[in-house]
Amino acid sequence: MNGRERMAVAGKRQRTAARDYLEAILVALIIAVVLRTFVVQAYRIPSDSMVNTLLPGDYLLVSKLAYQLGDPAPGDILVFQYPLNPSKDFVKRCIALEGQTVEIRDKVVFVNNQPAPMEPDVTFSDQRTLPAKLSNRDNFGPTVVPPGQVFVLGDNRDDSRDSRDWGFLDKKLIRGKALFVYWSWAPDPDAPEWESPYILPLLTIPFYNLAHFPQRMRWSRIGKTL
């Protein structure tokens, strides 16, 4: 084999390797899109409404197949489209299902006139108990959950916008069931933000996050099942 032939063979091998890499990347992208569309999706917690179960900066992996063949169960943490603005996603806990009677008496939740199980991380941030004539927060119902709907509450019971405010949740708006926390990054009000001119944040944000990584990374929360 002369030099020209060796170069031709080498070029063919390079083209074959490049094509193999491209095909592998395309397959990986297709798999990622399919998984994100039909199987699992990641969500970030932006607010305090699920404290202490979920903290701002927690990243969740959510099963989109969980309710394809069945309904939510009381106690499940649901990710859903906010009924008053479907472009936003909310995260709350399922408390009662269609046909069940839900009531809140002085902060205690009852389903079918029995105290509902309360998760250990449910918290109350306000020692006051508000009467029903002032607020639905601490005293609500009794009312029956309509067909095709569920009743949801935030685990931060005194600081959550949920079914006490905007009503029952249509099951058609549910995106999936929260499975576990796969990453947790504590918010930092002093952290630089993406803003114009974007060249400056491009330089400052990575260095800032790297310098503050030990303080912001919540290792103990990674893998927390929900």
Image (spheres, grey):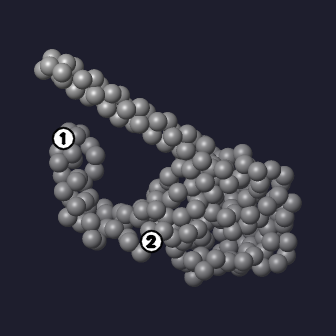
Residue type at mark 1: give it: Ile
Q: Nearer the viewer, mark 2 or mark 1?
A: 2
Is 48 left or right of 198, judged from the image as shown?
Answer: right
From this viewpoint, which residue is outermost toward the top? 4
For label 2, the crowd category at 10 Å Cα-Cα, with few meaning under 14, some 14 to 19 and many 20 or more, is some
From this viewpoint, which residue is outermost toward the front? 1
**Disc 2 from disc 1: Cα separation:** 33 Å
**Residue occupying image coordinates x 31% and y 67%:** 216
SS category of the residue bearing label 2: helix
According to the picture, the residue beneath numbered tag 1 turns out to be: 199
**Residue occupying image coordinates x 42% and y 62%:** 183
Q: Position of residue 125 (x, y in %)?
A: 53, 77
Q: Looking at the rendered structure, which numbered label has been put on residue 171?
A: none
- Nearest the viewer among 58 and 113 is 58
Q: Disc 2 vs disc 1: Cβ atoms closer than 8 Å?
A: no
- From this view, report whether residue 186 is shown above or below residue 220: above
Asked whether residue 48 appears in the rendered view, the answer is no
Question: Which quarter of the rendered picture does the C terminus lie within?
Answer: bottom right
**Residue occupying image coordinates x 73% and y 67%:** 74
Is 214 left or right of 94, judged from the image as shown?
Answer: left
Q: Position of residue 120 (x, y in %)?
A: 60, 80
Is 131 left or right of 89, judged from the image as shown?
Answer: right
- Nearest the viewer among 182 and 81 is 182
According to the picture, the residue beneath numbered tag 2 turns out to be: 221
Residue type at mark 2: give it: Arg
- Nearest the viewer among 125 and 216 is 216
For label 1, the crowd category at 10 Å Cα-Cα, with few meaning under 14, some 14 to 19 and many 20 or more, is few
Question: Which quarter of the rendered picture does the N terminus lie within?
Answer: top left
